[in-house]
Amino acid sequence: MKKSKSMIVLLLTCMMLVMAACSSGGGDAAKSETSTEIKFWTISLSPTFDDYINGMVDTFEKDNPGVKVKWEDIPIDAVEQKTLTSSASGNLADVVNLNTEFLKKLASLGALANMDELAADVKGDFYEGVWTAGEYKGSTYALPWYLANDVVLYNKDLLKKAGFDTPPTTVDEAWEMTKVIKEKTGAYGYSLTTIRDELLYSGIPILNEDFTKAAFNVPQAVEIFAKYKERNKEGLIPEEILLDQAKPQEWYAQEKLAWWQTGPNLFRQVNDLAPAVYEKSDATSSFAYSTGQIPVNTMNIAVSEKSKNKDAAVKFAKFVTNAENQLQLSKLSSVLPSAKKAAEDTFFAAGKDSTDPVEKGRYLAVNQLEKSMDLLPPVENLADINRAINDEFKRMLSDDLDPADAVAAAEDAVNKLLQ
C-alpha cells in the first residue's frame, strides 16, 4: 500500500508537470501529452489478473501517447478504509474499481464524477438493469464492469433420493421440495443468508420514492416473514448458515445442502472441496421470484470528481469496461460482462450442452442478463439498512416473535438510519 506521503509527492509531481505544460502556452503539444498520469485502483485482482490488467494498460497507453496509467491493487478488506480516507484527503485515484455499496458511499460524499454527463455516449452499451448499480439520488456515478447473477448448482443424487428428477424453478417450489428432501435424505434444500432479496424481488421496495423512509412495512412483507417463521419451525432453514457460522459452499460439498444458489464463477469452490460431489452436480437457472427479476452483483468503475486528468480518466474507464476487454476478462475468470456486445459472443453459447456445471452455469447466467436487475436503493448506508432488516428477521426466528412486530421493528430501525 502506498504511503500518503508518496501519494502527495506523486500528486505534486503531476501538478508541477501540468503547470509546466500550461506555462508553455499550449504550443508544445507533445510536452503536454507526456504530463498526463492517471492512477487506477482495483480490488483484489492481483496477482491472478496481473497479465490481464498490465496488458490492458499497455494497450491503452499505446493508443493514447503521453498518457500513463499507474495501477495499484487493493486487498478487499482494506478497500473501504483506503477509498474513504483517500477521498476525504483529496487523494482518491483517478479511476477506481468499487462494489455497489462503496460506490454509493463515495457518491454521497461528492467524491465521484457524474457519468451521466461524462459517459452518456456509452450508456446504451450496457444492460439497463446493471447500469442502475451506479445510481445515487437520480445520477449515475460509475460504469458497470464485471458482474455475477445467481444460477443454481444442484446435487442430482440427493434430488433423486428424494424422488425428484428435475430441480425446482421457482422460490416457492424450492421450499416445497426442501421439505421433502429434508424428510427423505436429512439434507437441507435451501440455504438463507438474507431476507432482503426476497422482499426486493417480490416487488416490495425497501425505501420510499425519495429514499427518506422505509417502505417495506406492508401486508405482503408480513406474509413473507410469517412464511419463513413457519419454515423455521419445520426445521427447514439451516441456522448455522443464516447466522454466518457456516458457509453454504462447504455444506454443499459435504452434501448437507441439495443446492447452492450463487454465481457460476464460484462453482469451482465445490470442485476444490469435494470433486466427487462436483461430479454429480448440474447447473440450472436461478429460482424465479414473483417479479421474474434476477438479483445481480456488480463491480463498477468510477472516476474521481477531483481528478486533475478527468478526460483521460473517463477515457480509460470506458476502455476498461468496453466489450472487448470485458469479454477477455470473462474468458479468464468466469465472471459475466455488463456490456451487451460481449455477452453475445459465441464463447458463452458453448456452455449450452456442457456437462460441466461452471460452463453450463455461465451460459444460463448470460441468458438471464436481460432480466437481471440491481434493485438496491441508491443510498449511502445500504449495508447498515440490510443489516437492520436481517437482524430483526433473525430475531423473529430465534425469539419466536410476531412477524408483524418484526417487520415494524425493522422499519423503525431503518428509519432511524435514514434520519
Image (spheres, rainbow, N blue to C red):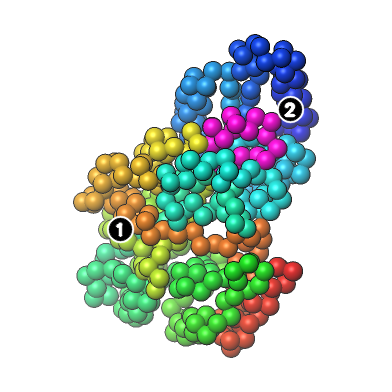
Neighbours of disc 1 within 10 Å: few (<14), some (14-19), many (20+)? many
Q: Residue at x 58, y 29 (%)?
A: 312
Mark 2, residue position: 11
What's the magenta region?
301-317
Q: Position of residue 415 (x, y in %)?
A: 69, 73
> Residue 350 falls in which quadrant of the image?
top left
- Can residue 309 be found in the magenta stretch? yes
26 or 225: nearer the eye? 26
Q: Please provide percent x and percent y for residue 83.
A: 68, 44
Indicate whether 360 appears above or below 193: above
Residue 283 - label: 1
**Residue 399 is at least partly visible in this image:** no
> Disc 2 vs disc 1: Cβ atoms closer than 8 Å?
no
Of mark 2 and mark 1, the one earlier in the sequence is: 2
Residue 341 seen by the camera? yes
Tell me the tag on residue 49: none
